[in-house]
Amino acid sequence: MKDSGLIFNNTKGTEFVIEDGIQSVRRSFQQQLQKTSLLIQHQKGQIKYIKDGSILNNEKQQLIEDELSFNRNLDQIKSLTWLGETQNNNMKVGRWNALWRGESLGIGGDYDKNGTKTGYWVEAFNHFWELSQVTQVGFYNNGIKQGRWNIKYKEQKIGGGNYTDQGLKEGEWIDLHQYFHYNNQVIFEGRYKNGIKIGFWEIMFREKMIEEFSFMLINPLYFSGFQNYNLNGIKIGKFVELIEDQLNFSQIVTVGQYINGEKEGLWDIKEKDKRKGGGFYKKNQKDGRWIDLEQILEQFKFLIKLLNNMERGVQKWAQMQQMEYGGGIYDENGFKNGFWVELNKSFSEDFQVFYTGQYVNGQKQGNWDIKQKHFREDTLQIIGGGNYNINGKQHGFWLDQDENYCEQLKISYSGEYSNGMKIGKWNINLEEQTIGGGYYNEQGMKQGIWIDLDENYSDGSYQNGVKVFQWQTNYQNQIIGGGYYNEKGEKIKKWIDLQFNFSNYCFIRYQGEYLNGIKQQQWNILYKENYTQTFIKFVRGCGFYNNNGTKIGMWINLYDNFSKDSLVTEIGIYENGQKSKKWNTFYRDSVIAGGYYNEDHNKDGNWIDLDENFSNYSLIKYVGRYQNGQKILIWQTYCKQKLMQELKQLNNFFRGGGFYNENGQKNGQWIDLHENYYKYCKIKYEGMYQKGKKQGKWNATYKNQIIGGGTYLYGKKYGLWIDLDENYYDDDQKIRQGEYLNGLPIGKFVCQKFKRKFNE
């Protein structure tokens, strides 16, 4: 990846900035975030976001939202647009609404005649994307946030607090992790004074939306997550910190002491209850021998950093098991010099890809090879590479590996560079077979006919980096989607779009019309259970969009985890893009859940919710009452074990539940289900909540027998505990026994298999 923030200009006065960014990728059947790079071009008030010679977005500088300016989130750059009116000097006035892939999000608000936000607003989370549909809801007064602001994830309030008249956070607050998403649900709870954090802050997480956020951070042994600030907002005392820029949930933290805001003394890097690394700080600077953490595509690999000579700063990297995987030398100025071995982002024991070559004063120069070592083999195979010129730019012929190159998808690119810019003909290769490609013009932009990897395999025309005319989407040698772009790269006319996570496990398409990138009129859902079948259309279609891309009238929505094993749909009414009145949830052809939305478009009254992982193998639902979007009073959990049992009999299979107080917090006696509760993992947790925090004795039960548990004090584990292994199930009944103090494991934990036999 190129250095972030590198600025350079061409002879025409255009400014280019190479920035680090993030994008979503699918790994091991799960959507995750990963780091990437993009080129930002700034000229005459226009900002272009460019990735690999393709313009992802082109905006006027004055029109970019303050909180999203110089965006580095590729999902947002490609999919998020704003619709509204401007006056002199492109000043925003009146109502502005956000659209995601041409569809209104229900996000936005009003600008006054001076272009200042005013009144009620729904704002998008900074890193809003498909799996982070987080909004911030509250009121502006003359462009200043004031009063209560709530943070919502989908339809659930999960955070927020109060602003002063000056727009400063004050009092109790719940903040979200900057990269909060479905697979990284981490929050921070504590107090502000005049916009400064003070006192004790807790780090909390959960694995499912139905769960309370737990004080404990690390699963399954749950380290306590805490931080402490003095009255001036300076970090003091013992701290537990997450890995900086953590994009996806990790069970790795750093633990140590702050003195007046500076790290001092021993700091440990821990995974679960095990010390994996660390060393000493002196006045916030690492000092002496360290075992450091190297992040490689969020798959954390531990490397030993041997500080052989602190004065010269010579550093060498080696793998924990004493087998050297990569590394090289830094000079006295901190620049890489000489021969280096660097690791691929997806590097792992089973997939070892290296980059080898020379550095001169921190710049790559000369020939660099890309090599792969196959599992349980000693030899290295050259799979790519090329040359860097004296400016550290790729030059001449190169065989590049895709940034997501892995054992399952060996994608590479071959062609010519000119001083770091792709030019001429480039091929896209799968192993040794050419599967796509096209031409780059002299400015390094895609031009003419291309076969791209975007949205599976798609082919069509580029005009100076902008998609134009007709494009087709191909999957396994069949055309399954596509449509037309106008000269601005906006979708127009009839289109067939793919579900964002379309794959062998998710054959879903959407069919309808666009007008200048905005969805219009009737849209239909097309679905099939497997590749060999024909796509079918749901009888009543999907629904209608108005001219602004806003859902109106009767709609059929697919449940978030819709698949052949979870044929769940929701049917109800939209009013100006918001759910309203009665909504029913169908499983196959039967109504099994639902309820009413009030005039504020919040759930209200009696409701039946399905578990977010509801499927043929996990038929779980929750029955209770909402008050203006907040759960109150008694909620009960029901679970059916076998598909042949009648769905109407779900109410006969009570499995858990409890009571919510007036603030929507769990309170009193509760029975919680394990996050992976299903036929072969029927684990329940039974105990007391006090204002949303576990208190007193809690038992883990399996088939009605106690198999683990211990004591909580204000949400923290204390004393002797029996923890269950995170993958506990019938055939692997592993437990861990040990002691906690103030939520932290102390001493030795003994691992063993549970030996008791269970009856059905």
Image: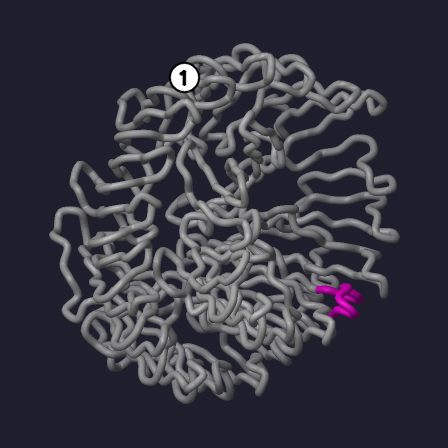
Q: Where residue 93 sits in the image (x, y, percent)?
A: 51, 67
Q: Where residue 139 sits in the image (x, y, percent)?
A: 59, 76
Please name the residue shown 54% across and 41% down the image. 44
Q: Which residues are magenta?
A: 191-201
Instruction: Establish if 646 lies above or below 534.
Output: below
Q: Where residue 157 sits in the image (x, y, percent)?
A: 53, 73
Specify the quadrant of the image occupied by residue 449.
top left
Instruction: Establish if 298 lies above or below 683.
Output: above
Instruction: Establish if 625 lies above or below 436.
Output: below
Q: Tell how many labels.
A: 1
Secondary structure beneath label 1:
strand
Left or right: residue 655 compared with residue 67:
left
User: Disc 1 residue type?
Assistant: Glu
Left or right: residue 174 compared with residue 290:
left
- Quadrant (top left, top right, bottom left, bottom right) of the N terminus: top right
Please name the residue shown 35% across and 45% down the image. 488
